[in-house]
Amino acid sequence: MNVFDREIERVERMCTPALLGRVVDVTGLTVSVEGLPAPVGAMCRIRRKGEQPAEAQVVGFRDDRAILMPLADLRGVSRGDEVVTMVSEARVGVCEALAGRVIDGMGRVIDDGPAVYYDAYYPLYRPAPRALERPRIREPLATGIRSMDTLLTAGRGQRLGLFAGTGVGKSVLMGMIARYTEADITVVALIGERGREVNEFLEKDIGPQGRKKCVMVLSTSDESPVLRVQAAFTATAVAEYFRDRGKSVLLLMDSLTRTAQAQRQIGLAAGEPPATKGYTPSAFALLPQLLERAGQTQEGSITGFYTVLVEADDVNDPVGDAVRGVLDGHVWLSRTLANRAHYPAISVPDSISRVMTDVVDQQHASAARTVLQALATWEQIEDLVSIGAYANGSNPAYDAVIQTRPAVLAFLQQRIGEGAGFVEGRSQLLALAQQIEELTRRLSQTPRVTGASAA
């Protein structure tokens, strides 16, 4: 798009016919407006007397009135204030220069960098790619996390959920993935996060290396629920722009739960009836609309990693339960492992990547099965070993798992500042699987000493 085309689009946006209404009531987080025939999702400005206009979004209707939810504080809004619509279609400006920048939920650059000149405007709300037009996922995407790349291998265009309770290390894990991934560009959406953690995430977790190819979309916990929901769609639209330009995009969204909670606030304020744990039907309807837009197309791919904050470490949390049926796999972060200083605290037996068998070779898949079987066996005998009730030599498979346990733990753990290459991790996996198999075979051939033979 050249400069002339951009100016034409800008003028067309400026010349969009405006619809007018008047404020008649303010209740809680919503503003009732009379005489405003704007559709749901339309952005409006409330012209407050003596103050800057307040932006708001149409979230529903009640009788002959439009229900608006503002993007900022309601102070200063009074009865009779004029309400005027903005651009009818919600869009976000996009360009290559967004790499390394921080934008808000409206798509506006909020860091101290130079001005950005957009190449195009992408709609925030658009249909997902058609099912029959999606190519099969056949290529792996390295994340730099050894346990994930080898035992839970992700494919380009896959959607994975990172399930965890509070304080288990999901944000640090996301930062490592953003820093060490092999994707061409990374889009990070921080939704409902504490403001204190933003600079910490940028400078410490992502670092200068990861930030160069990262677009961050930010909407902190103190912002309007409308902005928090919109930030999720803004991040997805930015990712779609880079995907349509032939790039492999990694979309990291933290968190999907806070997005659903923001939609719950909007739905309840608009008069929607609550369902499971207060979540409204619109909150559950929003999740597949957002998640299905990630994936692979003929032009490029969006690989999505979405964190899900489960309440009380309950895997059957309503949001988590709804999301698992849409995603292509999930990674469970265990509080038990985190309390043991095991990082990353990924519980591999409780996690799954549904496309792994399509993106790795047979040798890799076989080695992964060997290690997974060793992990499952350890879970069966861990209590017996801990209390000293297991007699060494009773079962060759158990003995092999016990003896190789230190090597398995060393393989699964990784320092925060350490990135693991995909090829290197695969070689380590093959070596570990061979060690387990050879030890099991050798112990199986060794005569077991029983009480009778010893006598």
Image (spheres, grey):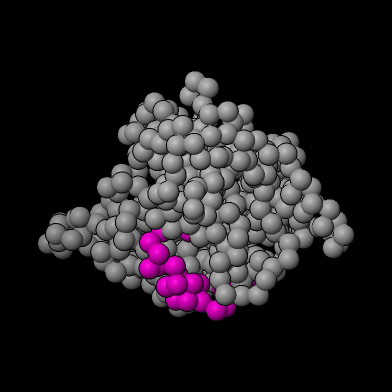
Q: Residue furthest front?
A: 50
Q: Position of residue 298 (x, y in %)?
A: 77, 49
- In the picture, the quarter occupied by the N terminus is bottom right
Q: Position of residue 178 (x, y in %)?
A: 54, 67
In this view, the residue in front, 370 or 124, is: 124
In this view, the residue in front, 454 or 302, is: 302
In the rendered image, residue 110 lying in the magenta stretch gets the answer no
Q: Residue furthest top?
A: 63
Most frequent secondary structure within the magenta stretch: helix
In this view, the residue in front, 39 or 285, is: 39
Residue 27 vertical placement versus 352 (above, below): above
Residue 435 at least partly seen:
no
Residue 221 vertical placement versus 262 (above, below): below
Q: Which residues are magenta?
A: 190-213
In the picture provided, is 16 more to the left or to the right than 303? Answer: right
Q: Going 29% across and 69% down the picture, which residue do you hit? A: 341
In the rendered image, residue 206 lying in the magenta stretch gets the answer yes
In the picture provided, is 25 more to the left or to the right than 446? Answer: right
